[in-house]
Image (cartoon, rainbow, N blue to C red):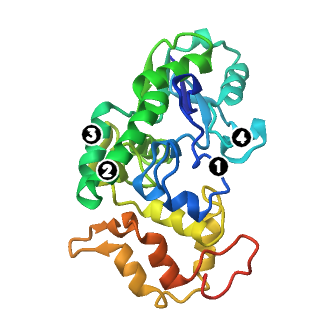
Amino acid sequence: MIVLGYSGFTRDLKRGGRVSPFAQTGLGPGILFDFHEGEVPLPMFPLGFFGHDASACLLIDGEVVACAAEERFIRCKHALNLAGNTLLPRRATAWCLEHAGIAASDVDSVSFYCDFQAEDLAERNRLLAPHVPVSTLGRVRAVWEEAFAGMVGPEAVADQCRDLLGQEPPVLIPVRHHLAHAASAFYPSGFAESLILTIDGSGETESSMLAIGGPEGITELDRVPLPTSLGTLYLALTVYLGFRGLGDEFKVMGLAAYGDPGRYRRLFDQLVHLDDAGRYDTYGLIDPDLRERLSTAIGPPRKPDQAVTAAHA
């Protein structure tokens, strides 16, 4: 059994899709917090944000025989092209096939790292509805539906897979995004059984998943649904502090060691709520006045060429 797994989306310009303003590393606060043509602010979980870090992996009879990241071939971080658009892992896939000495026609099935269905858009709408005005929800829904049709929906993904392989995929198996994260952590870990925790910006309808991995596979125990997302909050603050999103978050993590956690405690108590049962929410993240709140509490956004101060730490 030969299985090709890959990650990455690209906008389908034939369907009228646009380059996403999020498909770039030089994000600024204006991109984060404002509506743009064809895209919504980051705290409202744009589907156009998906697609960065395209890669491919080839398994033969359950053994990984080749894997590669697209950025290693195009020499652009996060596998974005010079126009800032996300890419499919064409070169990474070709390298994996060549390394294994096989052709695309030898692949038995293709596995993909997301599984967006129409029901997921409806669920996203339901989850966001209590937190934003009806008019705003309508704008968000329209942008989501455009990205679904041209980029992340089943038909769009099948078209992109066909384009990637240069032929009809034999069997295309979409995998829920957080299940893919969980599998990438558990199966190479060497543990026969393990607790698994995934946290990122967002998947189809969730930002975190708790599961158990064992001999029978991965069993989900719980999830954190949108619009709660620690990952999105971390990304937003990384960009606000003048660093590059999707790459410089580790610098912010290191910088935090030099800071005083009490200095902005009141602000973060408003952004992240922890209840007595140990669950949390980040509903403050989707506040339309978030930029003003950050500016009032922290000061104006730091420009990339400005000095890093104790206040930033």
Instruction: Name the amino acid, label 4.
Output: Ala
Task: Determine the image quadrant of residue 242.
Answer: bottom right
Sequence-first tag of 1 and 3? 1
Sequence-first tag of 1 and 4? 1
Kindly tell me whether residue 210 is visible in this rendering: no
Q: Residue 24 got which mark?
A: 1
Instruction: Name the amino acid, label 2.
Output: Leu
Q: Nearer the viewer, mark 2 or mark 4?
A: 2
Task: Determine the image quadrant of residue 239.
Answer: bottom right
Which quarter shows the C terminus? bottom right
Q: Nearer the viewer, mark 2 or mark 3?
A: 2
The residue that appears at 46% across and 35% down in the rendered structure is: 147
Q: Using the numbered discs, state the Cα–Cα distance from disc 2 to disc 3 in whole angstroms.
A: 12 Å
Q: Is residue 28 left or right of residue 117?
A: right
Sequence-first tag of 3 and 4? 4
Kindly tell me whether residue 21 is visible in this rendering: yes
Residue closest to the eye, 13 or 244: 13
Sequence-first tag of 2 and 4? 4
Q: Which residue is mark 2?
A: 137
Instruction: Name the amino acid, label 3.
Output: Ala
| Circles 2, 4 touching at the beta carbon (< 8 Å) | no
